[in-house]
Image (cartoon, rainbow, N blue to C red):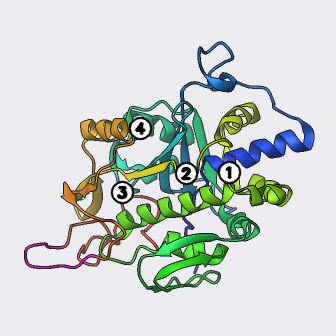
Amino acid sequence: MGRRRKLILLIAGLLGIMAAGFFWYNGFIGGGKTFGGDDVPGSPNGLQDRVSILLIGADQRPEQIKYSTDSLILTSVDTKTQQISLLSIPRDTRVALSGHGYHKINEIAALTDMPTLQKNVEQLTGVTLAGYVQTNFAGFKKIIDTLGGITVDVEKDMYYETGDLEDGYINLHKGVQRLDGSQALQYARFRHDALADISRTARQQVVLKAVAREMFRLSTLPKLPFLIPQLMEAVNTNLSARDIFALAKVVVGFDSANVISQTLPGAFLDIDGVSYWKVDPIEAKEVVKNLFLGITTAEVIDKQNVDLLKPVIVTPSKPLPKVPGNSQDPNGQKSSGYQVLKP
């Protein structure tokens, strides 16, 4: 059985390492555009007050040209308040793709290209993106291990046999613990519970915040020479080195605690046996606006107040939320795209 997607994304802290590597090794700050420009009033290092980037996780095998994008996180850096905002966009989100009709957002790159995916995320959220960073997962576990692992509060016991030749098992126990690269990957991949991919978006956010805490630690600095070449092999981006360097000069001074996250609210939608995540476009833009102000909502699933990381207990008065891919969804394994849902 082929390798299945690995769903860890790298946040702005990793971009900082990329920039530091360019600067330390050869002083290269590159050509190309900058986010803002040196004449932007009141903005440090020529940056605009806010810079937003799309982080993409994709199951792209070496031989593949077309592939689905399994994880999308809009990462926005406010250079004034020093807040980093993370908005997870569920992979089943239904969008209108020009010339192709309605599709899941994870199909856009396979049907068109990355710039078109970026444009559609901009239309959905109302946010102008400076660019994207796509993960190549081959070296990610090694990056986590070079960091010395990350600390995560695993909310419950997790076990699943993935069937992969490598990383064939997800086997984690509940509690606060130090996860190595393989274990961090297991945590970010797990989706076999009542909230399925929706709860997995929250776990990805947990991992990103944990990575941020490690990146901002002074003890990480001596590891940079080892992290830089691994990182360069692990990402693909349309940002220039100059872009990255400009952002890094600001981000390295941030407090890692000032990272807030939100999963884009929506509701279960079944059309002709295909499961979608239905998002109200007006509400989506309002959620983003509030997130940038530091305001989040727990009403993620069909306007129900749900803790995405808390095990769901079903009662007669509180039925299981309908979520694409959960055990109560008979269409959870169907997809109109290029790739069947996998763990």
Q: SS class of the residue under badge 2?
A: strand
> Of the residues under marks 1 and 3, which one precedes in the sequence?
1
Q: Residues within 10 Å of mark 2 (few under 14, many from 20)?
A: many
The residue that disc 3 covers is 92
Looking at the rendered structure, the kind of residue marked 2 is Ile
> Of the residues under marks 4 and 3, which one precedes in the sequence?
3
> Is 174 drawn above or below residue 250 in the view shown?
below
Which label is found at residue 56? 2
The residue that disc 1 covers is 14
> Is 275 drawn above or below residue 103 in the view shown?
below
Looking at the rendered structure, the kind of residue marked 1 is Leu
Q: Which residues are magenta?
A: 312-319
Looking at the rendered structure, the kind of residue marked 3 is Asp
Judge whether residue 316 is colored magenta. yes
Which label is found at residue 292? 4
Residue 314 is left or right of residue 33, and the answer is left
Residue at image position (61%, 58%) is: 213
